[in-house]
Image (cartoon, rainbow, N blue to C red):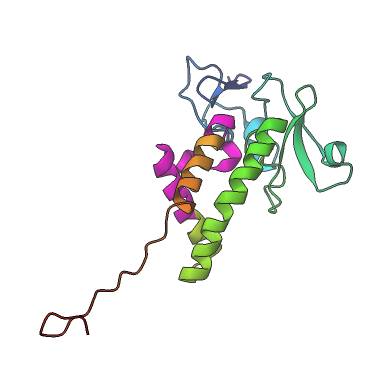
Amino acid sequence: MTTERCLYYHAESDSYFWESPSEMVGQTLDEALCADVTDEPEHRREAKRRGVYDVVCPYCGAPAVLVDSKEVYGRSYGNIWLCRPCRAWVGVHKVEGNENKPLGRLADESLRDWKKRVHAAFDPLWKAKMRRDGCSKGVARKAAYTWLAEQLGISVHRCHIGEFDDEMCQRALGAIRGLTNRPRGRKIQSDRRNDTGEGG
């Protein structure tokens, strides 16, 4: 016999749990939603296959609702997951078969601002790699996120701006600025001298 399962958010560890934190190791939202849990009811597995997700607000723990983005932007840019009391939301994937999958965690006004700032600093890094190395967007972004994960001391799997909170955004921005503000290496020309030791 299967029982209904609930997805919980644990703010202290910024992790999601099936059932309760004492019974399950913390996971990212994507891991928790996509986990292949054998005792999960079939109707819930089928719902995820159809792109139906249980999304909770990281600020109040209430379920988020899937709505048209017109509700917050005044015009439609597609669906978003929204927590109305917290005025927190997140966009969704626009890939066929994943239309309702959240792009990350819900973000309030402060976090949305931080994410914009991080993206404004981070995106030029992987775009420059694409131009410089002639690699694909996927390869360039993976390399950039791998570098960022190392700077932040977290796994690459957990390193995605969409999943960051305010503090992690600030740390990421500091790491990126540390890289981009670093003095460029100057080409040092040696003082050529002739055999007599005098400048030539």
Identify the residue shown where x is 22% and y is 80%: 192
Residue 151 in magenta? yes
Is 122 inside the magenta-drawn segment?
Answer: no
Above or below residue 12? Residue 180 is below
At 57% from the left and 42% from the top, the residue drawn is 161
Is 62 located above or below residue 116 in the figure?
above
Q: Residue at x 76, y 39 (%)?
A: 80
Total marks in image: 0
Answer yes or no: is residue 113 visible.
yes
Q: Nearer the viewer, residue 130 or 175?
A: 175
Residue occupying the far front of the picture = 198
Residue span colored magenta: 142-168
Question: Does residue 103 appear in the picture of this structure?
Answer: no
Foreground residue among 193 and 147: 193
On the picture, is 186 further left or further right than 77?
left
The quarter in which the N terminus is drawn is top right
Question: Residue 24 in the image: x percent, y percent?
Answer: 48, 21
Nearest the camera: 149 or 98? 149
- In what quadrant of the picture does the C terminus appear? bottom left
Query: What residue is at 37 percent from the left and 65 percent from the top?
Result: 186
**Quadrant of res 17:** top right
Q: Is residue 66 left or right of residue 71?
A: left
The spot of residue 83 in percent (x, y) is 76, 27
Q: Main secondary structure of the magenta part?
A: helix
Single out the residue that lies furthest toward the top.
Answer: 22
| Residue at the extreme left of the image, as rendered | 196
Looking at the picture, does residue 87 appear above or below residue 61? Answer: below
The picture places residue 71, in percent across and down from the top left corner, at: 86, 36
Q: Residue furthest right?
A: 74
